[in-house]
Amino acid sequence: MKRLMKAAAVAVTGALALTACSSAGGSDDSGTTIGIYGFAVPEAANDAIAAEFNKTDEGKDVKFSGSYGASGEQSRKVADTKGKDVDYVHFSLEGDVTRLVDAGLVAEDWNAGPNKGIVSSSIAVIAVEKGNPLGIKGWDDLTRKDVKVITADPASSGAARWNIMALYTHALSTGADEKQADEYLKKVFNNVTSWAASGREATEAFKKGVGNVLITYENEAILAKQKGEELDYIVPETSFLIENPGAVLKDADDVATDWLEFVLSDKGQAEFVKKGFRPVGDLDISGIEVEGANDPANPFPTPSKKLYSVADLGGWPAIVEEWFGKDGVKLRFDNLYAEATKK
Amino acid sequence: MTETLAATPGPARTTSRPSGLFGLTPTSGIGLGLALVWFSVLVLIPLAAVVGAAAAGGWGSFWNTLTDAQTFAALRLTVLEAAGVTVVNAVIGTVVAWVLVRDHFFGKRVLDVVIDIPFALPTIVAGLVLLSLYGPESPVGINIVNTRQGIFLALLFVTLPFVVRTVQPVLLELDADVEEAAASLGASRLTTFRRIILPSLVPAIAAGSSLGFARAISEFGSLVLISGNTPYQTEVASLKILKFIEGDNQAGAAAVAVLLLLVAVVTIVVLDLISRRVARRG
Amino acid sequence: MADTRQIRARKGPVTYFLRFFVIAYLAVLVIWPLWEVTSRTFAPTERGAEAGVAAFLERLQEPSVSYAFGLTATVAFWAVLINTAFGVGISLLITRYRFPGRRILSVLIDLPMSVSPVVVGLALVLAYSTGQGWFGEALEEVGIFIIGTTPGLIMATAFVSLPLVIREIVPVLEEIGTDAEMAASSLGANGWQTFRRITLPSIKWAVVYGVVLSMARSLGEFGAVKIVSPGAEFRGETATILIQNRYTNYEEPTAYAAAFVLVLASVLALVVVSLIRKEDHA
């Protein structure tokens, strides 16, 4: 028995040591690897684009390594490691790229191109339980008593800030003044049962039955439907255009620039479209099947009343300065949130 | 002897018996130096960095973070849940230990291993394990996601071994003669338990409880999938720290972290005191 | 086990009630959920997911999954190696030598067990990250990167499992006392000889337990690793991080498959410990 034990111990240790050696050198052997840091939801799309990129001359033999999570956290991790092993970032918010510009990791003119640094786009929608049992029609219904809202938390998530702006601009579209808009926001916040850490975790919470209405990206709702989740989504009368920036790091491998170009090309955008994103630029999407969209023939209906964008509100820096405080400083959103959630 | 896993839960303590100890030789001196350097690099310096980050914003901002209504609610929830779990564990853990030591039945050995599973299981897997039975697709129709009961259950799960494993060895060593004497003198079983057995178990229960409490306060992995992060409802301290980190509020994260560290330090000091008292008695 | 000493069997209804209660409690809290994970591993509830052992094995052979397990093994291997060397050394020092601060050190050694994993991660980032750590700049200049690389993962893992080996060895060292070692050294044996011939044989099994426990803990570390790791496929995604990523990314069957492997590993570790213990005391 004793000998058996010893033999077993030696065997286990040996096996572990072997795996240790084999995997230690495993990450950077032949070929280039593009390290992607992205916000929570575009993983499926980026993987699909990567597969297409591998078919091109520039992209042959290129490997990908993607890290996805809450936008702010991802941006921090890149800054923390000074961009080591990171070539391309794809964040929810402009500010998360700006941080890397400030840290000297991304070129100042990253958003000088015709696409202004934006690589993917979507709009804010309302996801509901299959068959819409509550009969939700638009943003106004979110203040109802029987509605339990799930959204990402602006403290950590980019998705959340888009959601808040969608709610706010909806209020403006009804002719509300700033004070009435605040009241509307507070009422919705009151109905929120889960402030998830990221857009993806909000979807998770919805799947787990924590609430019955989810404010999310259109593409995230479409992806969930593609994956067979039991939900429907509604494109409300007004919505907010979500524009996610992407950038190549200064010290990145040259192939990363090719990659960014490919992402912006018609082929790249077509893959985004298949996963439910709206195209950036003027791609003709008529031939592309968007599985999971409400109407695959017309997958991306324009909100009937108005589609707001960041430009309508003076750009992200202005919005952040007015709404979202940092390091414990409380601004407009933070105060509304604190008041509304106070029990 | 059945001290397994979380056995030896008292601090890796040395009773103060300096007699019989060697003075430092040059070799052991170098060893001590190396050990201290590594310990500092791995544990002390990083923890000092947390305290430093919390202090960087000054006392005011530290205090503001902790008294922020939401953070405070998260801390209160964490402490209350941990305290509740500790009380339940103190009772049930003792009962489990009792059954494992005094009762004899088929399959007891298996149960003995089962006790340790929550300790050895990766915490994220523990969360997944609980979700598979008590989650949205629960075959028994219970959904604990984003409820305080869910957090309570997860904490019960991960802290299960602590009291059991501290009480078990003590119970094994207990002198049956005294109990029999008490019984022969006409004491009821309850009286015997209350007057004879319980007092000798108290230090072990206390030690196990404080370990469990520390674990419950700091638990993270098993709650990630279960808590819905709803402020005032189900947001606990460790998840609050993660939210602060994700939201790039390092000072806030550090402030809450320092408070948790304080709890950890208090816990091990209490443990040390308990074990010293026991050592003196023995 | 206690079976060696027969305690009088006085079995009343209370005994049976307690036995039933303990079995039911463990069943609901641990056994049933574990069973549920197992059944989901081999019979996923997801639409279109294949069931059976072959599908399970296929999920594990995905390159990113094998990378994750490889990385986890690497990290656990080094963390355990470091902790064992450090653990044996420091245990000898605090039980055998007199030096100022010995008591404080023996208390501090326990601290890592009570620190929240999130705090561990945060602490390492604040101390060593290139961007904002205390020593980040200095380390960068000499080309050392800790956060976001395998060494960082090893440090985080070593941190959380640090006391496990020590907790096993210290009680044994205290129990055997110093007489034999004193005698050996008075007969002219040098420090190394004394250690190899006298000390090591008596702590051998304690070291083995400690190693197995540290291994189980290291394989399953999640919170601390999550903060310091880039968490990308083929780059820092350990098995536990993979479980979370897959679970939140509509790939529950893969998450369950990986979780099942970790469950298996920890149960195996426990059984090994239990067997060794039996052998040791036989």
Image (cartoon, coloured by chain):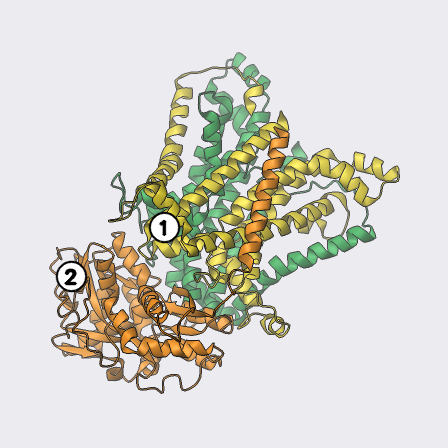
Chain colours: A orange, B green, C yellow
The quadrant in which the N terminus of chain A is found is top right
Side of A33 relative to B32 (left or right)? left
Residue that appears at 44% across and 65% down: B245
Above-or-below relation of C144 to A225:
below
Dot 1 amino acid type: Thr
Distance from the alpha carbon under mark 1 to that under mark 2: 39 Å
Above-or-below relation of B3 to A265:
above
Residue that appears at 47% across and 66% down: B63
Side of A287 relative to B213 (left or right)? left
User: Can you give x and y, in whole percent of width and height, for residue B135 in the image?
Assistant: 30, 46
User: Can you give x and y, in whole percent of width and height, for residue C40 in the image?
Assistant: 32, 42
The residue carrying mark 1 is: C254
Secondary structure, mark 2, is loop
The residue closer to the viewer here, B196 or A168, is A168
Dot 2 amino acid type: Arg
Disc 1 versus disc 2: nearer the observer? 1
- The reply to whether residue C216 is in sight is yes
Secondary structure, mark 1, is helix
User: Can you give x and y, in whole percent of width and height, for residue A190 in the image?
Assistant: 24, 62
User: Can you give x and y, in whole percent of width and height, for residue B157 in the image?
Assistant: 42, 41
Circle number at residue C200: none
The quadrant in which the C terminus of chain A is found is bottom left
The residue carrying mark 2 is: A144
The residue closer to the viewer here, C255 or B155, is C255
- The reply to whether residue B185 is in sight is no
Q: Chain of mark 1?
A: C
